[in-house]
Image (cartoon, helix red, strand yellow):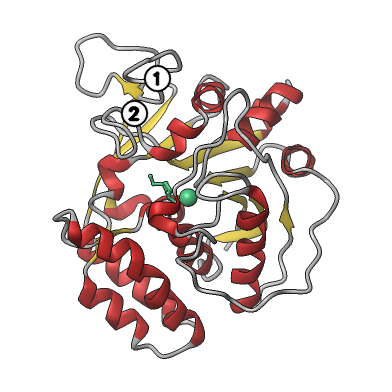
Amino acid sequence: MNRIPVILDCDTGVDDAIAIMLINKLPQFNLLALTSVAGNVELEKTTNNALRVLELIKSDIPVYRGAAKPIFREHVKAVYIHGENGLGGIELPQTSHVVPGITAWDYIYQEALKWQGELEIIAIGPLTNLGLAFIKYKQLPELIKRIVIMGGSASIGNVTPAAEFNIYVDPEAADIVFRSGVPVYMCGLDITMKAYLTAEEISQVGALGTKPAKFFQEVAQGPLNFSLRIGLAGMSLHDPAAVLYASDPSIFETHQVGMRVETKGPLSIGRTVTDLYSDTQWQNNGFIITDVDRKAFYQKVIALMSQY
Ligand code: BDR
Ligand code: CA
């Protein structure tokens, strides 16, 4: 099988950590590196968390440090879900791996040149690194095959009534990405709220008994309890949904759409606006993912975690 060269751009909090463990076992990908960005918590923590998760799963792929704050705005965090350290207070062992001296956006361009149009990006945090890469390298859009994001929503938000967290944190960067000309596949809340695991299913993963499986169960407890408290059926695996979509869309429903980002607000700042339901049709610039076979999704998650 020709494995797809891919970079995972992440703000390692709880569901990013799970996404890293899953992508590491997906045979479709040649995972080149992780790139870190400020999002759920500060950049130093998201970078360090990514390194620690890689250490846990015995992967030696590099982590490139990205942007410490959004392009124009102050950084907004999500510690109420992910905890102050980003991993619900769980202290994974430290790693001796050193972060290379090249920035995430320079690294993305370097790899895009090398792979001559074959590189794919999966971005599961605020889109600051990609936004900066497109600003700096005008040729970059021709060199990236597609971008799969966890972010946005065709309907409601989760951080404000209108906006999903990753887009809300850096709407200008998201706007640059949406208008870059590279096809964007949007795994937003429309799909990720359906890609949840129940408390029992999370326990079943933990019962696999390996260190990664036990970490999965422990780190999921905070978001799981939060979700149950607000009346949801389980913990949404937002970031893993984007990773699994990128590897195999067959259990998902996809629609080609035009989509943009509201950057002015004030009430709807960070909202992703699509023509999915409207009479007015914009020029298509991407795809929105709207549904998933949840049971099949869970089966994939547990099958991948069984490989540790
Ligand atoms: C997204 O926001 C972050 O808190 C999660 O890691 C996920 O990427 C969900 O809105
Ligand atoms: Ca994330």
List x then y, in percent, for residue 64.
73, 52
Is 81 placed left or right of 103 in the picture?
left
Report crowding for label 1: few under 14, some 14 to 19, many 20 or more residues within 10 A (C-alpha).
some
Tell me, yes or no, whether the two marked residues, 1 and 2, touch with CB atoms within 8 Å. Answer: yes
Q: Which residue lies furthest to the top in this view?
A: 280
The answer to whether residue 253 is seen in the rendering is no
Task: Say how many tags the image has.
Answer: 2
Residue 98, horizontal then vertical, whole percent: 81, 64
Query: Residue type at mark 1?
Result: Asn
Q: Position of residue 26 (x, y in %)?
A: 50, 66
286 left or right of 273 in image: right
Residue that mark 1 sits on: 284
Quadrant, the N terminus: bottom right
- The residue depicted at 68 percent of the width and 32 percent of the height is 143
Earlier in the chain: of badge 1 and badge 2, it is 2
Q: Which amino acid does label 2 sit on?
A: Gln
Q: Where is residue 261 in the image (x, y as percent from the top left)?
A: 42, 21
Residue shown at the point (49%, 80%) measured from the top left: 212
Residue that carries the numbered disc 2 in the rendered image = 256
**What residue is rendered at 43% in x and 83% in y?**
214
The answer to whether 202 appears left or right of 8 in the picture is: left
Along the viewing direction, whichever of 182 and 179 lies nearer the viewer: 179
Looking at this view, is 87 or 282 the one in front?
A: 87
Which quadrant would residue 3 be assigned to in this image? Answer: bottom right
Q: In this view, does 199 lie to the left or right of 60?
A: left
Q: In which quarter of the image is residue 191?
A: top left
Q: Secondary structure under badge 1?
A: loop
Specify the label residue 237 is tagged with. Answer: none
Q: Is residue 101 above or below residue 255?
A: below
Q: In this view, does 255 lie above or below 30?
A: above
At a point 50% along the width and 30% down the height, the residue shown is 183
